[in-house]
Image (tube, coloured by chain):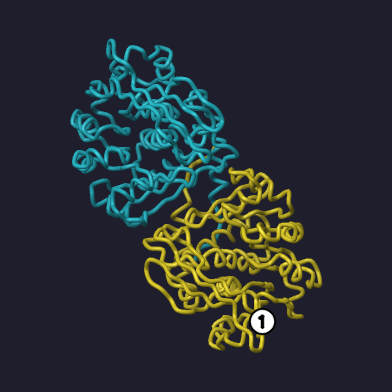
Chain colours: A cyan, B yellow
Amino acid sequence: MGKLLIVGSMAFDAIETPFGKTGRILGGAGTFIGLAASQFKLDAAIVSVVGDDFPQSYMDILKNKNIDLTGVEVVKGGKTFFWEGKYHNDLNSRDTLVTELNTLADFNPIVPADFTSADVVMLGNLHPNIQMSVINQMEERPKLIILDTMNFWMNSTWDELMAVIKKIDVITINDEEARQMTSEYSLVKAAAKIQEMGPKYVVIKKGEHGALLFHKENIFFAPALPLEEVFDPTGAGDTFAGGFAGYLTESGNISFESMKNAIIHGSNLASFCVERFGTERMINLQKHEVDSRLVQFRDLTQFNIELT
Amino acid sequence: MGKLLIVGSMAFDAIETPFGKTGRILGGAGTFIGLAASQFKLDAAIVSVVGDDFPQSYMDILKNKNIDLTGVEVVKGGKTFFWEGKYHNDLNSRDTLVTELNTLADFNPIVPADFTSADVVMLGNLHPNIQMSVINQMEERPKLIILDTMNFWMNSTWDELMAVIKKIDVITINDEEARQMTSEYSLVKAAAKIQEMGPKYVVIKKGEHGALLFHKENIFFAPALPLEEVFDPTGAGDTFAGGFAGYLTESGNISFESMKNAIIHGSNLASFCVERFGTERMINLQKHEVDSRLVQFRDLTQFNIELT
């Protein structure tokens, strides 16, 4: 089986949406990526850091999905990364109310020996130096390195970000961030400029408006599944990335055609994530639900025009 | 060949975008719908009204596309509908600077005898009473009646709009208008409510984010083609509607499966419309260009996942 190495935060989230409010629940990019990737046949490990306030029951959720957690450092006396946010009524924007980096502030990732030869590396949204450190620990160049980032790192660590994205294959980024990164409004132009910065594949996430995959002259698009109700968007982008990385690890095929399928799988899994608060829906997600929603994706997008 | 009856404005437009500014050029919903529909094998007629300031050369553009203009009233001494608008930098929003209804204010549509038995009727965005008058002139119930409308008519003529949409099959409307019409943020819920108002098929246009087709439990989605540059969005929605109506008229098949193809054809044609000011690109559009861009739509959206 293919090996997937995931680097990303494990966290407490507190979320308010128009539909309700949670206490401190399980969150973090690494968590969402891992849960999504666990839908595929692969060996996955998460590299992360938590405090000793992080409950064993949360660890067990991931362990029960066969995710290797030997790379998760538990800092004695430390506190786990905490994020609190409140979504606006349309769920397309949110205010961050609290960010406590805690143990994440001094995170020094250690890749478990078993995973220094991983086939695919998924670098979740973290300081670019942390992402670089993980790449440097790999024994040989992985078949595929995927990196997620956000505007915060563009604003505060531009040079470090540029250094790490030179070393990766796929970047995932949202539409506004792609525009900010390139000063191009057109996503086609933005994606071309980002490819010049290093990554040969650019995935632009547009939230409820779907996701685009760019590679040279090729473009592929997957919509978000139209849902009656989006309950909580937290983790949707990470779930998408986890599905994308998970599919490519399982298939072992990193061609553009295979990435199209990966984009669909990522979008499919993200459509579940938003149906409940936090990780709730992903933890209990069953294979037959995933399969049947893939049929919905087919019906939503596939047409039959004879082309001449 | 199938017959398509188009009702819609023929107009002068003056347009400013970040890329430049036009003088008074050919515009109007009926014009854009007609130009798009003329890409298909069908007999089309436009019912509209202009003043005697409307140049013969503009009439000839449509006549040369084999569009029957006997239903276009030329009001002696009257002035043609004029719209002037300026787009914001992102081209997603615009300010209307001038609207002079002129002859359109007293428009009394007369359907040419040859088209009172049209197979498909495309009611462009106009006062709902004008749309109703056209329906009432049909000798027999057309196979398909499609109606386009906008927030202006919801605000000013709600009862008349409700009366006419009870009599149609397909409504095309943008996302914000669908939300306004139903007080539902979720487009899935909005489309369900609109179906209860009359139209069995609901097409929600999302501009650069594509278009959705709803019918009972079925949903189909077509993206807008990602373009390097959108030059002028004027007429894109009408071009989409013209492609949709034109394809269904040519095919004679009004099933949901056929409407999927119609949505793709509409999106395909709209992708050309926005490449130049006004009607410029549509007037000179060649079949081989249309066909080759359909291949791009296939590559953009079609994937190959084995479904179990």
Above or below for A193 versus A174: below
Residue B133, position as x, y percentages in the image: 76, 70
Residue receiving disc 1: B72
> Can you say whether A209 is above or below B121 in the image?
above
Q: Is residue B50 visible?
A: yes
Which residue is rendered at x = 66% and y = 85% of the image?
Answer: B75
Does B166 sit above or below residue B138? above
Task: Say which residue appears at 48% left-offset and 47% top-offset.
Answer: A209
Horizontal and vertical percent position of residue B40: 58, 72
Q: What is the x, y in percent for residue B60?
A: 56, 86
Quadrant of residue B38 in the image? Answer: bottom right
In terms of depth relative to the viewer, which is nearer, A245 or A41? A245
Q: Quadrant of the C terminus of chain B?
A: top right
Q: Residue furthest right?
A: B139
Specify whether B287 is left or right of B202: left
Q: Secondary structure at mark 1?
A: strand
